[in-house]
């Protein structure tokens, strides 16, 4: 029984997702109180009514006590996790004990991350985000919510089945020669050809990568481009998987899967015909309809019918607007607009292109101004006025002239821009001619921020604003064909390889059974690059889900709870649990491989962002924290998690870990480097 | 009352406690304050009280309805609450966020149980007494539960026992003999002997001992009777008695323990706990000394409970089942939780009754020198009532688990008999009839008087002695069966190794509690390494000072953290803790 709900502080539902069981529970609870003969209320209203007291109580607590709920647990082990982002309250519920508090909090933060990827800086204004998440038009709302629900389900599926999403790091396909060839091909042929084309409509390919299921075969970034952050890359993999689900259970459809497989099956047609492309070419509702969402109850079906509105098919080859972090010499800019093109090569193999949007400089400017107003507001709130409030970069005068120019440059006056102009004039009048920088400016700071976000939204989120900006379909088709030709001979190999990336029996340089008797499994993560190595786990031939559902998979999943110790500042943990012995190590090295001294790690609060890389990059903060004492040195952070048989003497286990740690990242032996 | 409470509350970081009666606030116009039965800290402004009570009770009701199950824990960013909901009554106990949730819930259970033990069912007491009178009770129990312990004591919510390291074992034997002598009278259920507020010997399950001690601690500290029902017994000024309330399950445990060994049989246990007794005397002398051994061995293969610590060395060596470690599945299985209040699991309750035929031994420190004192068997558990299940502390009928039914709601009045000799107190749980039976009363009194005097004289002369061997390490050894703690950590909290040891122990204790199969773990930060191990019956935590060789954190078998297990085994032997 699971649910995720986003509500505004006025208890308006901005988004919900439920599993069938929760859906039924709500209907049962609500249906019972309805008079006979009346049609049950819309599901959205029922769920709103049920959660409203919690949401209202939550805002009362914030207002009057300055504290907010973070978690409820009931006697039957139902867990409710609550988290407030600005004026939006996220509630995640689990009633079947297969997710713990950390999982739920992670889900909430991942949802938030997805919002940032999809809506960019609009998420910085609760007012605008509310409108964005809950469009007045029911049809539009249904479409949007379905898409978000699909993303959430895809994430949950990956998190449950995929090791790389379990530890939140990217896994590469281990085949150095092919990887190298592909990267070269992307660089010399594909990206060059696309970027030199005259038809590219101002779009410029910055990154190109090939995914085999969730594993990365090759990644190329053009020169002088800011690197793609691990967090963004993981989020994009979720989006790609949402478009072209490679649910392992669907690969070999059993009798019971036939029904559920029929939906996504169209994506597996080797050479998509134009009609298929139309629904697969964008992150549309068809892709979002993951097979997990099945209705069991006829009542539910009826209620859901109201949601089955006519779906407007998105235009073919439409890119997906994504907002990614860009780090330039001048600084870090979050949520800069990009276009993402997902080109399916074959079922399970996808080419992803990320292009720069011509007007993306505008987004960076907006961010600079947003930040300036936020800082000013903060200082005013702290009681600093006048000169004290004005210090900092850019100076208030500089801000004034820059913003004046910015608004002028925005050009044609439409409603949004003239509104920004009006608010800005009013702000200037108050700040520079009348009272100066006083507390009275606080609402005007807020208002400026909202207006800036509005302009941003206008430029990057409106359907109309991007109609003409995209790589023409012919060009995309060309790229797809080129890549298909290149990988044709490798296709089947890649699909198998992605499931047996590293096996416990043999990889290129390590024979685990011989070198490490008693070692059952390990996961090694290089947190500085956000990449992981782990043997593939296969419980049975038929169950190809990487983690499977066996007891071992369960144990590994549980043992990721060592994060809990890391949260409390413990970087080394060993656990003897049942018949197994688990070890977890986190350490730092410099670039030369010299092991750096351990320091006391920060202890995180209970409700802080979960440790990982997808939602909030904990390790990046950790590296920054650690680097403070290692100025001028490149610091790398590694993690090793191992599972041994419990009967192996501890000394041996530790020696194994030591060997693994040194062998896996040894440049000469490591198959990845 | 409030003053010392404030000073002490820092220790377990208790921030709030309240009891709210929702039935008093039903209409729109009813002010929330009408429902507030008790609120701690008492000086909290009323609107603040109303806010907390109203919001927490309201939101908990809503969540409970959504999940069809009462809320147990409610967390906020800066504080967290253990919650009990029972009909319209709503209890909340607030602690700071770093206090383990498990311990916080235990604390609330203990508090409610204490109240019910001395005052009977909550609703009824509020009908019969004024809020002011009962407020005094709540604050007294809060004070008692928080008084004089280290933070580790809160984390494990364990009993305070006398430091046995400086006491002649014969004295402990003597104490348990006194208790047995009292049990010659069939109206005596069980007893315990306390010295200066600490347990010397007890025949009761730990949860009952805690409650019995509350009364003693108060009379010892204040030397005046509390305002509750009590009657002077004509025997002597040293003897007092007061009415207490036991749940049926508690009563069954006590009555079934208190059986005639001769008529007992493994295959056909007597189901009638109120069997008229054929003999009065059940002392050491009339128990064949090898009998208990046979019993134990017969039971041993079925019993995952490790009795090694309780048996004499020869016995444990001779016991065939002592060597194989308990299977993981049974680690938290119900057979080790005969006590209704034990922090056992809430699952698997059904198997319990089959396992009731096991040996349990409640006496402290008596160790192997006193085999006759073992009380093998829990027969006479009335099956139909089925209340000996692990009800997780719903002593006064909390939100009853399905299947337990109403039986737990029933509280049976009993009498607490107390005989004081200076700092020494003999506390007996007796049937109320004893008070009317002057002869029996006299017999109990006189049978124990001389021995009590002697014991008191001896205990008084025992010098507190130097604190146990300190050594360059910290440890805590928690006995889950007897609910006792041995530790060399004196203060607790704060910074430094003591503080980090306590924090690590809190973290690991929660993990042990949540994970059935976890046996041992080592956790290490840059400055601290803590080793923890547990068996079905005990949890041990160990930290070694010094050895602050800076590590890199990379896997290294020479890392000092990994030598902790062998160090712990070696060092703790001299504290009487065997980790072998």
Image (tube, rainbow, N blue to C red):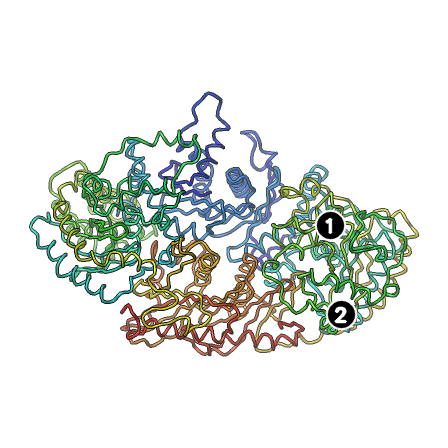
SS at circle 1: helix
| 10 Å crowding of disc 1: few (<14), some (14-19), many (20+) | many
Question: Which of the pair A506/A459 is nearer the observer?
Answer: A506
Instruction: Name the residue located 72 percent from the left edge and 41 percent from the top edge.
Output: B410
| 10 Å crowding of disc 2: few (<14), some (14-19), many (20+) | some
Above or below: residue B402 compared with residue A536: above
Residue identifier under label 2: B368
Question: Which of the pair A371/A490 is nearer the observer?
Answer: A490
Decide if residue B336 is on the left or right side of residue A239: right
Mark 2 or 1: the one toward you: 2
Decide if residue A393 is on the left or right side of residue B384: left
Residue identifier under label 1: B250
Question: Which of the pair A548/A110 is nearer the observer?
Answer: A548
| Residue B69 horizontal/vertical position (percent) | 55, 41
Above or below: residue A80 compared with residue A10: below
Q: Residue furthest top?
A: A37
Chain-order first, disc 2 or disc 1: 1
Above or below: residue A400 compared with residue B562: above
Decide if residue A573 is on the left or right side of residue B463: left
The disc numbered 1 marks a residue on which chain?
B
């Amino acid at each position: 029984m699971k649910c995720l709900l986003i509500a505004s502080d006025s208890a308006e539902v901005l988004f919900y997702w439920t599993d069938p069981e929760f859906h039924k529970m709500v209907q049962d609870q609500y249906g019972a109180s309805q008079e006979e003969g009346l049609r049950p209320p819309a599901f959205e209203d029922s769920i709103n009514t049920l959660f409203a007291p919690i949401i209202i109580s939550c805002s009362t607590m914030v207002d009057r006590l300055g504290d907010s709920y973070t978690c409820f647990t009931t006697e039957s082990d139902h867990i409710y996790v609550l988290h407030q982002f600005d004026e939006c309250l996220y509630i995640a519920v689990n009633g079947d004990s297969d997710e713990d508090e950390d999982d739920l909090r992670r889900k909430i933060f991942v949802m938030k991350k997805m919002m940032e990827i999809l809506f960019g800086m609009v998420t910085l204004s609760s007012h605008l985000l509310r409108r964005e998440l809950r469009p007045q038009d029911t049809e539009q709302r249904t479409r949007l919510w379905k898409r978000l629900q699909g993303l959430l389900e895809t994430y949950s599926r990956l998190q449950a089945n995929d090791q790389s999403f379990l530890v939140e790091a990217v896994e590469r396909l281990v085949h150095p020669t092919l990887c190298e060839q592909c990267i070269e091909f992307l660089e010399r042929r594909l990206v060059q050809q696309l970027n030199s084309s005259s038809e590219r409509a101002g779009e410029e390919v910055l990154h190109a990568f090939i995914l085999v299921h969730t594993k990365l075969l090759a990644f190329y970034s053009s020169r002088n481009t800011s690197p793609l952050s691990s967090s963004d890359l993981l989020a994009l993999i979720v989006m790609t998987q949402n478009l072209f689900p490679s649910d392992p259970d669907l690969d070999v459809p059993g009798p019971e899967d036939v029904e559920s497989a029929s939906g996504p099956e169209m994506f597996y047609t080797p050479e998509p015909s134009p009609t298929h492309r139309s629904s697969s070419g964008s992150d549309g509702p068809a892709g979002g309809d993951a097979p997990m969402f099945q209705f069991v109850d006829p009542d539910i079906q009826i209620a859901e019918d109201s949601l089955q509105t006519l779906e407007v098919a998105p235009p073919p080859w439409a890119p997906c607007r994504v907002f990614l972090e860009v780090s330039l010499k001048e600084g870090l800019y979050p949520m800069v607009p990009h276009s993402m093109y997902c080109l399916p090569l074959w079922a399970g193999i996808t080419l992803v292109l990320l292009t720069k949007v011509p007007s993306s400089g505008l987004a960076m400017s907006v961010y600079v101004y947003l930040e300036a107003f936020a800082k000013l507001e903060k200082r005013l709130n702290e009681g600093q006025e006048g000169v004290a409030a004005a210090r900092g970069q850019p100076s208030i005068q500089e801000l004034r002239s820059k913003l004046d120019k910015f608004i002028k440059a925005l050009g044609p006056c439409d409603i949004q821009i003239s509104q920004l102009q009006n608010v800005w004039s009013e702000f200037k009048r108050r700040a520079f001619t009348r009272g100066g920088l006083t507390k009275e400016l606080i609402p005007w700071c807020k208002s400026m921020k909202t207006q800036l976000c509005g302009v941003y939204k206008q430029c990057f989120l409106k359907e109309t604003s991007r109609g003409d900006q995209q790589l023409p379909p012919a060009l995309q088709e060309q790229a797809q064909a080129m890549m298909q030709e290149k990988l044709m001979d490798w296709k089947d190999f890649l699909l198998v390889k992605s499931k047996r990336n590293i096996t416990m029996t043999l990889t290129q340089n390590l024979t685990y059974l011989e070198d490490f008797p008693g070692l059952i499994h390990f996961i090694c993560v290089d947190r500085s690059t956000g990449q992981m190595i782990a043997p593939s786990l296969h419980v049975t031939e038929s169950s190809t889900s990487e983690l499977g559902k066996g007891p071992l998979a369960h144990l590994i999943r549980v043992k990721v709870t060592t994060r809990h110790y890391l949260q409390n500042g413990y970087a080394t943990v060993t656990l003897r649990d049942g018949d197994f012995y688990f070890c977890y190590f986190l350490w730092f090295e410099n670039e030369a491989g010299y092991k750096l001294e351990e320091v006391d790690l920060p202890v995180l609060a209970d409700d802080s962002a979960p440790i990982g890389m997808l939602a909030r990059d904990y390790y990046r903060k950790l590296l920054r924290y650690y680097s403070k004492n290692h100025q001028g040195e490149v610091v790398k952070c590694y993690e090793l998690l191992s599972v041994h048989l419990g009967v192996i003497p501890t000394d041996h286990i530790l020696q194994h870990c030591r060997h693994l740690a040194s062998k896996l990242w040894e440049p000469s032996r490591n198959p990845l480097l | 009352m409030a003053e010392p409470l404030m000073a002490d509350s820092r220790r377990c970081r208790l921030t709030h406690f309240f009891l709210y009666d929702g039935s008093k606030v039903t209409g729109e116009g009813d002010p929330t304050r009408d429902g507030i039965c008790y609120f701690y800290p008492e000086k909290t402004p009323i609107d603040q009280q109303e806010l907390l009570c109203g919001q927490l009770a309201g939101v908990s009701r809503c969540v409970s309805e959504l999940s069809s199950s009462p809320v147990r824990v409610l967390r906020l960013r800066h504080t967290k609450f253990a919650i009990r909901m029972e009909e319209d009554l709503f209890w909340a106990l607030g602690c700071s966020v770093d206090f383990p949730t498990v311990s916080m819930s235990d604390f609330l259970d203990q508090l409610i149980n204490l109240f019910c033990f001395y005052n009977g069912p909550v609703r009824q007491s509020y009908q019969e007494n004024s809020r002011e009178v009962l407020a005094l009770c709540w604050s007294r129990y809060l004070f008692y539960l928080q008084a004089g312990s280290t933070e580790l004591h809160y984390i494990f919510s364990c009993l305070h026992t006398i430091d046995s390291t400086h006491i002649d074992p014969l004295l402990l034997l003597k104490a348990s003999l006194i208790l047995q002598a009292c049990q010659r009278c069939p109206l005596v259920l069980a007893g315990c002997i306390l010295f200066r507020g600490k347990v010397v010997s007890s025949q009761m399950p730990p949860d009952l001992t805690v409650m019995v001690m509350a009364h003693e601690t108060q009379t010892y500290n204040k030397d005046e009777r509390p305002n509750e029902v009590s009657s002077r017994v004509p025997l002597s000024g040293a003897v007092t008695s007061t009415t207490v309330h036991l749940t049926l399950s508690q009563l069954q445990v006590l009555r079934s323990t208190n059986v005639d060994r001769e008529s007992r049989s493994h295959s056909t246990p007597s189901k009638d706990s109120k069997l008229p007794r054929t003999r009065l005397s059940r002392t050491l002398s009339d128990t064949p000394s090898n009998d208990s051994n046979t019993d134990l061995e017969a039971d041993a293969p079925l019993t995952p409970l490790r009795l090694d610590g309780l048996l004499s060395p020869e016995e444990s060596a001779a016991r065939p089942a002592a060597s194989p470690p308990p299977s993981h599945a049974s680690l938290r299985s119900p057979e080790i939780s005969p006590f209704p209040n034990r922090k056992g699991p809430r699952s698997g309750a059904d198997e319990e009754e089959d396992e009731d035929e096991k040996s349990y031994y409640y006496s402290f420190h008596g160790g192997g020198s006193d085999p006759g004192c073992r009380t093998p068997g829990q027969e006479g558990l009335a099956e139909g009532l089925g209340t000996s299940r692990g009800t997780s502390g719903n002593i006064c009928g909390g939100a009853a688990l399905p299947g337990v039914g109403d039986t737990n709601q029933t509280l049976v009045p009993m009498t607490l008999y107390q005989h004081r000799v200076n700092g020494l107190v003999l506390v007996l749980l007796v049937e109320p009839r004893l008070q009317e039976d002057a002869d029996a009363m006299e017999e109990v009194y006189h049978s124990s008087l001389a021995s009590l005097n002697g014991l008191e004289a001896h205990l008084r002369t025992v010098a507190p002695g130097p604190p146990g061997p300190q050594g360059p390490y910290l440890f805590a050894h928690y006995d889950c069966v007897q609910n006792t703690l041995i530790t060399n950590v004196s203060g607790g909290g704060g910074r430094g190794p003591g503080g980090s040891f306590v924090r690590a122990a809190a973290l690991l204790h929660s993990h042990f509690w949540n994970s059935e199969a976890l046996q041992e773990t080592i956790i290490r930060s840059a400055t601290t390494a803590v080793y923890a191990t547990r068996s079905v019956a005990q949890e041990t935590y160990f930290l070694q000072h010094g050895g602050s060789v800076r590590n890199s954190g990379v896997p290294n078998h020479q890392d000092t953290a990994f030598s902790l297990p062998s160090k712990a085994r070696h060092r703790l032997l001299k504290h009487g803790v065997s980790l072998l």
